[in-house]
Image (cartoon, rainbow, N blue to C red):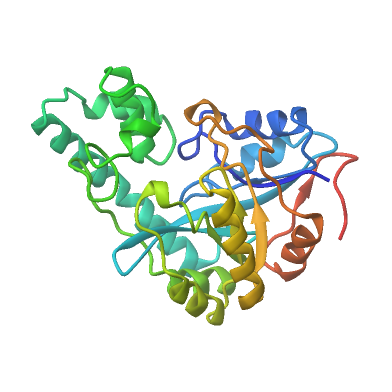
């Protein structure tokens, strides 16, 4: 089985619609794919309606968190999307994205970059506006060659010249909310040092004690030695280990199924979840 548990659609900052994502996942030979848009479940209905035969869809979200000044992301799987506490927190994070984008645009204008809200809003479309949309605008204007090149101290990286903070959840509260909604919590790309400061292992240990289910180990932003240490840490803390592409369509270079999750780990995630169940396309899917 080929299982990719971290993918984005146009409901946040991907370039595939939710329907295109599940169709492309099936075409890429995946058996299971997770839709984990940033702080939103807006893509669920379209993705569920389009799941092709032979593919299983895991519903989820990637929640924006911050601990001791370090930004981090928490993957939430198979939670009840209507559970009031988690829904309210997602809306709080999502609603702060628009004023944050306006703030980044203002800073870029001060730096002489003629980006506009209209341009960023066009790029975001119906998705939750975020830094990748501003980064895409910088690419369109010829300021940087790629979206990744916008995430530097010169531009949009944490603490960069055009960086603006947004509301981000406390990870311990996020874990509590995810679990309270019947979901499973996995720390996304915890060793992605190229993105900026990373969360220390001592904090990951505290999260594990607070109910964290797993950490994402196999990821494009993790060097081989980082993956090895994270796998060792997961063993020490009795955490699940996942692998994922973090697919964003054409906005990133990663491809669907570039990294995958062990079927036994996927089975454990589905066993722990009580808020929702995976959705199988007609005649497809797998039982655990």
Residue 62 at what x, y percent from top left?
51, 53
Does the rendering let one see residue 78?
yes
Q: Could you say where residue 15 lies in the image, as x and y percent from the top left?
A: 51, 28
**Residue at figure coordinates x 60%, y 35% from the top left:** 18
- Of all residues, the one furthest to the left in this rendering is 110
**Image position of 131 with respect to 36: above or below:** above
Furthest residue toward right: 283
Percent across and percent down for residue 243 are: 65, 51
Q: Residue at x 71, y 34 (%)?
A: 25
Q: Is residue 254 above or below residue 91?
A: above
Q: Residue at x 58, y 63 (%)?
A: 230
Quarter holding the C terminus is bottom right
Residue toward you, 171 or 37: 171
276 versus 113 height, above or below: below
**Image location (x, y in percent) of residue 166:** 28, 54
**Whether residue 182 is visible:** no
Please identify the quarter of the rendering in which residue 171 is found: bottom left
Given residues 169 and 48, the one toward you in this image is 169
- Residue farthest along the front direction in this orientation: 225
Specify whether 54 is left or right of 205. right
Is 121 positioned to the left or the right of 79 in the image? Answer: left
Give the camera-side residue of 169 and 3: 3
Q: Is residue 70 above or below residue 193?
A: below
The furthest residue to the bottom: 209
Name which quarter of the figure residue 246 lies in.
top right
Total labels: the figure holds 0
The residue depicted at 42 percent of the width and 58 percent of the height is: 72
In this rendering, would 217 be left or right of 169?
Answer: right
């Amino acid at each position: 089985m080929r299982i990719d548990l971290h993918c984005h659609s146009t409901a946040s900052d991907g370039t595939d619609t939710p329907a295109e994502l599940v169709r492309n996942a099936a075409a890429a030979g995946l058996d299971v794919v997770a839709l984990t848009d940033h702080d939103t479940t807006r893509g669920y209905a379209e993705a569920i309606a389009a799941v092709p035969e032979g593919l299983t869809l895991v519903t989820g979200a990637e929640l924006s968190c911050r601990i001791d000044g370090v930004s981090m992301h928490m993957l939430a799987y198979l939670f009840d999307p209507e559970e009031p506490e988690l829904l309210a927190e997602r809306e709080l994070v999502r609603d702060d994205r628009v004023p944050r984008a306006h703030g980044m645009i203002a800073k870029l204008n001060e730096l002489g970059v003629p980006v506009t809200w209209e341009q960023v809003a066009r790029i975001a479309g119906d998705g939750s506006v975020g830094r990748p949309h501003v980064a895409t605008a910088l690419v369109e204007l010829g300021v940087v060659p790629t979206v990744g090149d916008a995430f530097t101290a010169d531009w949009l990286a944490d603490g960069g010249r055009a960086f603006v903070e947004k509301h981000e959840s406390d990870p311990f509260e996020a874990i509590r909310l995810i679990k309270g909604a019947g979901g499973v919590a996995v720390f996304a790309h915890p060793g992605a040092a190229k993105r900026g400061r990373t969360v220390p292992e001592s904090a990951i240990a505290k999260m594990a004690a607070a109910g964290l289910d797993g950490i994402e180990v196999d990821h494009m932003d993790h060097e081989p030695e980082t993956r090895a240490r994270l796998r060792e840490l997961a063993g020490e803390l009795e955490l699940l280990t996942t692998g994922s592409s973090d697919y964003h369509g054409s906005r990133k270079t990663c491809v669907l199924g570039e990294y995958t999750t062990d079927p036994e780990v996927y089975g454990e995630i589905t066993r722990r979840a009580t808020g929702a169940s995976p959705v199988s396309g007609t005649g497809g899917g797998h039982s655990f």
